[in-house]
Amino acid sequence: MNINWKKTIAIVASAAVLLSVAACGSSTASDAGDSGSKSGKKTVGFVAVGPEGGYRTANENDIKAAFDKAGFDLVYAPTQNNDQQKQIQAFNKFVNDEVDAIVLSSTEDSGWDDSLKKAAEAEIPVFTVDRHVEVKDAEAKKAVVAYIGPDHEWQGEQAAEYVNKNFPDGANGIVLEGPAGLSVVKDRTKGFNAKIASNQKILESQSANWSTDEAKTVTAGLLDKYKSENISWIFAQNDEMGLGAAQAVDAAGMKGKVKIIAVDGTKAALEAVAKGDLAFDIETNPLFG
C-alpha cells in the first residue's frame, strides 16, 4: 500500500470540502460483500447508517454519486436500526481487505477505539462524516484524518434562539431527541441548552428515535401529561420527529397554538412550514459527498 497515496487522499478530501458537490442520485457503488477493487480504481469503504429518513437518504446518495463521479470504487456497507456491531464488523472487514480509505458515519460516538487502532496500524485514513466519534486511544486517533459535516451544536443554538425570540416572556415546551449515544443528539442538545433563556421551561425531553410515528405517540402522551402546563413550543431534533409532533398537535386541536421547530430541511418539512404545521426548520445540508 502506497503511503504517499494516504497523504494525497487526505489533502484531496480536505480540499474537496470546499467545493460544491453533485446533486443526490443513484450510483454504482459496490456491495459490501466484495471490498476488493477489480477495476484498478482506488477502493473506499463506506460504513454507513442506512435507512433512517429523508436526510439520510439524500446524504448517502450524494456520497455514492460523488465518489462514483470522482472515479473511486466505493463499497457501501449500511447498517439497520442503528446497529453499531454491524458497523464495526463492516469497518474491520474493510481494514482486513486493505481498502485505501474508510468513510465512517457512525451510529454511536464511542466504542470505535479498537477498530480505529487497527486502521491506524494498517495506514488506512478514516474520514468521519456527519457524526463525530469520541476516541481515547492515542494510536486510534491517528486514523481519523478529517471530519466532514455540519455544526450540530449551532443548529441547537438556532432552535433555542427562535424560541427565545418568539416567547420573550418565557413559555413551556418539550424536546424530542434522537437516539441516545449519538454525537449529533448530544451536540444539538448542548447547543439548545446553552442558548435557551432562563425563563423558558423544558417540561420534559424524550427520545423518539428520529421516527415520525414514534414522535406522534410521544408527543400525544406529553401533551396529555402536561395539558395544564400550556405547552407553547416543541423542539424536534429532526424533521421526521417534527412532522410526527405536528400530527399529534393537530389531533389535539392545538394547531397554531404550539410552535414546532425541526432540523434538516427536507422537502416534506419545508412544505409543512409553508402550511403552518411547522413553525421553523433549520437546514442540515446533506450534500457533502
Image (cartoon, grey):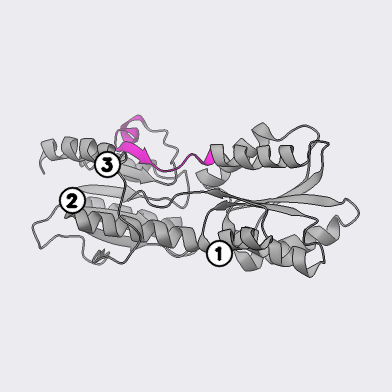
Q: Position of residue 103 (x, y in %)?
A: 31, 49
Q: Residue at x 37, y 58 (%)?
A: 60
Q: Residue at x 16, y 37 (%)?
A: 8
> Which sits earlier in the primary sequence, circle 3 or circle 1?
3
Q: Mark 1 touching mark 2, by CB under 8 A?
A: no
Q: Position of residue 162 (x, y in %)?
A: 67, 41
What is the CA distance from the residue labelled 1 to the residue labelled 2?
A: 41 Å
Identified by mark 1, the residue type is: Ala
In the foreground, 44 or 262: 262
Give the quarter of the image for residue 166. Answer: top right
Identified by mark 3, the residue type is: Ala
Give the quarter of the image for residue 59. Answer: bottom left
Q: Residue at x 24, y 50 (%)?
A: 95
The secondary structure type at the circle numbered 3 is: helix
What is the CA distance from the residue labelled 3 to the residue labelled 1?
A: 29 Å
The secondary structure type at the circle numbered 1 is: helix
Q: Verify whether residue 248 appears in magenta.
A: no
Q: Which mark is residue 16?
A: 3
| As drawn, 197 above or below 41 | above
> Which sits earlier in the primary sequence, circle 1 or circle 2?
2
Q: Position of residue 137 (x, y in %)?
A: 38, 33
Q: Which residue is mark 1?
A: 268
Q: Which residue is mark 2?
A: 98
Give the quarter of the image for residue 202. Answer: top right
| Highlighted range, magenta | 138-153
* Left or right relative to 177: residue 135: left
| As drawn, 234 above or below 3 | below
